[in-house]
Image: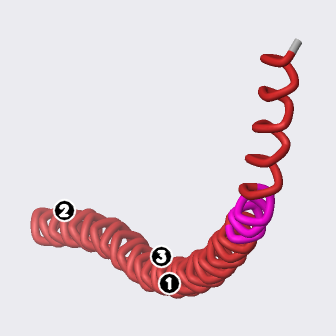
Amino acid sequence: MIKNFFKRIITEVIKELISPQLEEFRKFILLQQESFQGEIRTRLEGFEKNIEARFDDFKSFMVREVEDIKQDIRAINRRLDDLYQVVVRREEHYSLVDEVRRLRDDVEMLKRKVFQQQ
């Protein structure tokens, strides 16, 4: 009994002695936790802004690249149209050359017939 009594008294005394220090330590830990959370929150916000800025930069870069590609495609299409026109004209030219040859041949044949009849 006496042993339990002393044990209880010693426990109460220790609690009274340590309680204020434990409370201070608990407050210190809470302040550290809040500070840490605030720092993490600030860093995350900065990271988010940085990522958004990078994404916006990448997006504008891609828009410029797409516009450049569209311009290149338009230029290539114009060149293809020009090339097609050249091919069409060449075909027309060859067709006309063939027609001229046939006409020359016909004229030569007619000349021979005329000269043979005389």
The answer to whether 93 appears left or right of 54 in the picture is left
Q: Residues within 10 Å of mark 3 (few under 14, many from 20)?
A: few
The type of residue carrying mark 1 is Phe
Query: Of callouts 2 and 3, which one flags the residue occurring earlier in the amino acid sequence?
Result: 3
- What residue is pinned by disc 2? 109
The quadrant holding residue 47 is: bottom right
The quadrant holding residue 118 is: bottom left
Residue 109 percent location from the top left of the image? 18, 62
- What residue is pinned by disc 3? 73
Does 11 appear in magenta? no
SS category of the residue bearing label 3: helix
Q: Nearer the viewer, residue 32 or 56?
A: 32
Main secondary structure type of the part rendered in magenta: helix
Residue found 68% across the figure and 76% down from its top? 35
Residue 110 percent location from the top left of the image? 23, 67
Front: mark 2 or 3: 3
Q: Nearer the viewer, residue 58 or 98?
A: 58
Query: Of callouts 3 and 1, which one flags the residue occurring earlier in the amino acid sequence?
Result: 1
- What residue is pinned by disc 1? 61
Residue 77 percent location from the top left of the image? 48, 76
The type of residue carrying mark 3 is Ile
